[in-house]
Amino acid sequence: MNGNLRFITYLIFVKQLKSKKMTTQQVANRLVELCRTGQIHQAQVELYADDISCNEPEYAPTKSAKGKEAVMEKGKQFASMIEERHGGSFSDPQVCGRYFSVAMVLDATFKGMGRQVLEEICVYEVKDGKIVFEQFYY
Amino acid sequence: MNGNLRFITYLIFVKQLKSKKMTTQQVANRLVELCRTGQIHQAQVELYADDISCNEPEYAPTKSAKGKEAVMEKGKQFASMIEERHGGSFSDPQVCGRYFSVAMVLDATFKGMGRQVLEEICVYEVKDGKIVFEQFYY
């Protein structure tokens, strides 16, 4: 009986743990952790909300997009433009309320555009433990 | 002769120093330094470009504005809404290329709206040593 009770308590604990939504800080840390190890696709699968909006500057080579599928497709398009990645970095996230920002540097040779160093401030909005909005400044 | 030469060299040095535009990092540091000591008006006078654009969220109590005068007027309007400031903070700036971001917290009682804690990510764009664009996320 004591053993059963302990097991039930354990199951309830696991269920609560699973249903617990990540905080902005947790989402931010996980995004940076995955990006730093090159798992950008995994970051999108794991952290993007279905109705995410992604805003790009007007002059961006890839256009703004809405919806997880469209935004992930945009990510693929951008990746396909890179001929060679020479280096880059992701800062620790700066978290405030439901928003956080990350400073990103990408040193790469782009197809037909030569080598360029992209310096970006990326802003993310988190709702219910998922990223619902991202805006890139570069 | 030697003395004259040294004086001319000094004058050229001072001229170069004066004409040197601040880098994004220098503008960011100065903004945070002034804001932390409550000199927000001085920060605007010193660091805003004449044609600055300020973007607010749609639901903001003060609307987006363009031009140094209009943006500073907006700042005054916002300040006049505060009944009592209980606390707040400005993070170190996160700088990348010509953009930087600051995490800002304001704990204040607003006239007719009670006490609220405002948590913002503020993004700034720097051009020729001046802030030409600011966007607030909260």
Image (cartoon, coloured by chain):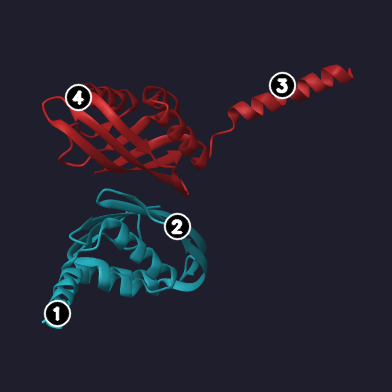
Chain colours: A red, B cyan
**A136 relative to B48, above or below:** above
Q: Secondary structure at mark 4?
A: helix
| A17 vs B106: above or below | above
Q: Characterize the local packing of mark 2: few (<14), some (14-19) or many (20 or more) Cα atoms within 10 angstroms.
A: some
> How far separated are the C-alphas under marks 1 and 3?
86 Å
Is residue A48 something one can see in this rendering?
no
Residue A35 in the image, given as x and y percentages of width and height: 40, 30
Query: Of circles 1 and 4, which is in front?
Result: 1
Which quadrant holds residue B127? bottom left
Could you tell which of marks 2 and 1 lies nearer the N-terminus?
1
* Chain bearing mark 3: A
Kindly report which numbered mark, 2 or 1, lies closer to the viewer in this rendering: 1
Total labels drawn: 4
Sequence order check, earlier mark of 4 and 3 = 3
Q: Quadrant of residue A123?
A: top left
**Is mark 2 in CB contact (under 8 Å) with mark 1?**
no
Q: Secondary structure at mark 1?
A: helix
Residue that lies at the very extreme toward the right in this rendered image: A1
Q: CA distance from mark 2 to mark 1?
A: 49 Å
What residue sits right under mark 4 in the picture?
A: A81
Seen in the image, is B132 located left or right of residue A133?
left
- Residue for badge 1: B2
Structural distance between the alpha carbons of marks 3 and 2: 41 Å
Residue B107, compared with residue A114, is above or below; it is below
Q: Secondary structure at mark 2?
A: loop
Tell me the tag on residue B91. Answer: 2
Kind of residue at badge 2: Ser
Q: Amino acid at mark 4?
A: Met
